[in-house]
Amino acid sequence: MQSVCICSEVHFPWMPKWYWPSGGYRSPEFETYFDQPQIYSALERNVPEIISTNEALLDSIDNGAKYTFDISGIFLDQCKWNPALIESFQEIKDRGANFSASPYYHSVSSLFPDNKEFKDQVSMHRDKIKEIFSINPRTFINAELILTKELSTTLKDMKFKCLISEGSENLLYGSDPMYVYGNHIPTLLRHISLSEDIELRFSDQNWKSYPLIADKFASWIAGMEGDVTTLHLKYSSILAHQQNRSDILQFLIDLPESFDKYGISMVTPEEALKKFKTKELPSIINKSTSRYGMHNLLGNHPQHLYLHELISIGEILQTLKDTPEYEKLNCIYRYLQQSEILLEMGSDNNNLGYEKAVNSFSAISDFKRALLEVRV
């Protein structure tokens, strides 16, 4: 019997404001680089859709569904502005939902040469999930589904049981990602096409498979060979489909019954490990990947340079640990590590990549200047 593992990322990034120090240099406060009122407004606009999505998922769970949630630390911090959000996810947890761990700041810290910053953020996130949901996550999902040669070894040392990453071409060479793969820790790979059918194409009336209903989707999976189909969906995509007045919530409610009709079970990542034997995939040991490929994060010179600046700033911060400003500065530094900042300066960003890069470098260079002044 084939199984399906569905994971959902819940994350609202804190993008840097358009920044240029026109009136002279200012002190490095959080508000210097990030527009908190704008971020608050964006969250509040989405609260009704988040709550209604969670209510639909409760119905889906009652129908037999199993879901794993990848909720960023940044989003959990934002939930303080509206406690009803935490209560909503708490109810889902009480019905049996699973929770994974990730870097607290949805950061690219796993790409740093020293893994201390990465491990610190993962431990922060693990502790936050324990504090709020009384769950100790055993599954790890990196920001942008990043996988590196060193990552699985680090996660094994941190006692994780499972890793979920991207089913990219450079790992699979044309094969479908339908198995539990052997690694330092067992790894599930996202089925890109089927995930995109829900994430990207669900509301597209020009799509040849529109409208997508649960029974049709289940029949596609039933016709495939393999053990487990892993879907990784962004909550923001589900919210967008809601705003397009699609039937996405009914689709989610109907999924478990449709899967059951075709003899497909829904499992958590840990259940998939117990149910299926691992399959060898040599490339997973020595290749790197991320959501849609590493070129999305590090495909041009500005992205490489920004990563280099993050690493350099981290080294400077280590010399400031005994200063009274350290905690504040380290918090700003971690928000500047968000994966979306690198993605926004990508070459495919609708001709805005250059402008985003200029803005991000304006902010990070000013922050580095402030650190050097503190060190002096």
Image (cartoon, grey):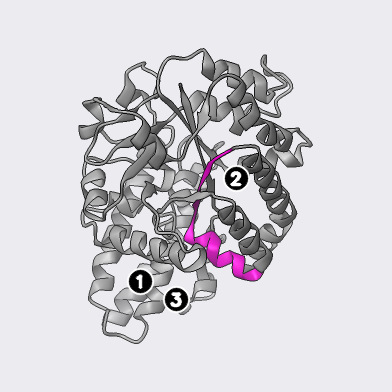
Q: Are marks 3 and 1 in contact (CB under 8 Å)?
A: no
The three-letter code of the residue at mark 3 reads Pro
Name the side, left or right, on which 240 lies relative to 33. right
Q: Position of residue 167 (x, y in %)?
A: 39, 29
Which of the 4 image quadrants contains residue 333?
A: bottom left
The answer to whether residue 80 is magenta is yes
Q: CA distance from mark 3 to mark 1?
A: 9 Å
Q: Position of residue 148 (x, y in %)?
A: 27, 41
**Badge 3, how many Cα within 10 Å: few under 14, some, many 20+?**
some
Of the two numbered discs 3 and 1 in the rendering, the one whose residue sits closer to the viewer: 3
Instruction: Quickly name the residue at label 3.
Output: 28
Q: CA distance from mark 3 to mark 2?
A: 32 Å
The answer to whether residue 343 is magenta is no
Image height of 273 relative to 42, above or below = above
Q: Position of residue 222 (x, y in %)?
A: 53, 16
Q: Position of residue 51 (x, y in %)?
A: 70, 53
Q: CA distance from mark 1 to mark 2?
A: 37 Å
The three-letter code of the residue at mark 1 reads Arg
Helix, strand or loop at label 1? It is: helix
Instruction: Quickly name the residue at label 2.
Output: 235
Which of the 4 image quadrants contains residue 209?
A: top right
Check residue 369 in the rendering and tell me which mark sits there, or answer none: 1
Q: Residue furthest bottom?
A: 324
At 39% across and 61% down in the image, what residue appears? 126
At 56% across and 55% down in the image, what residue appears? 93
Of the two numbered discs 3 and 2 in the rendering, the one whose residue sits closer to the viewer: 2
Image height of 53 relative to 293, above or below = below
The three-letter code of the residue at mark 2 reads Tyr
